[in-house]
Amino acid sequence: MGERFVPYLPRDREDELRRIAKVLVAPGKGILAADESNASMSKRLDMIKLENNEENRRLYRQMLLCCGKEMSEHIGGVILFHETVYQKADDGVAFIKHLQQNGVVPGVKVELTLTYMILCRISA
């Protein structure tokens, strides 16, 4: 029987994953699933008589994701739809940066066309 290869992360990456896990499972906190696809967003926007376009989806997400430090009192992490990763708030700051600045861990739902997960580092 051959040896089994077990991949190990560098120490700094292990520490980063531990830190993220602690934030996500902190007492009294939860994970916000804000990963609505464009089709799901259409249903939400139709209810308030808005056209389903990228700008209206961005405005909706801005309302959810840019509500300040208070959000981090109850939310440890947010699952995002991939379109959201590239969107910015009215102030020009990426939604992911807003979340990070408020102590919330951004993540993205892994889909067939998306093969990586954004844990906490992004250049914006």
Image (cartoon, helix red, strand yellow):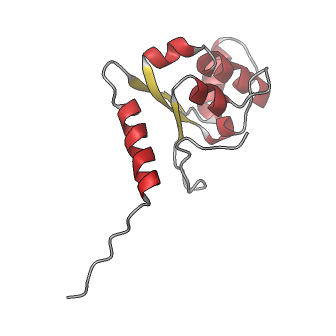
Which residue is at the front of the view, 38 or 70?
A: 70
Considering only vertical position in the picture, is 49 above or below 79? above
Q: Quadrant of residue 112?
A: bottom right
Name the residue at 72% across, 39% down.
Answer: 86
Q: Quadrant of residue 35?
A: top right
The spot of residue 41 in percent (x, y) is 63, 27
The spot of residue 111 in percent (x, y) is 54, 50
Which residue is at the front of the view, 45 or 72?
A: 72
Name the residue at 51% across, 16% down.
Answer: 71
The spot of residue 105 in percent (x, y) is 50, 33
Considering only vertical position in the picture, is 122 above or below 87? below
- The quadrant of the picture occupied by the C terminus is top right
* Extreme-bottom residue of the structure: 1
In the figure, is residue 104 to the left or right of 68? left
* Extreme-left residue of the structure: 1
In the figure, is residue 46 to the left or right of 80? right
The spot of residue 75 in percent (x, y) is 45, 22
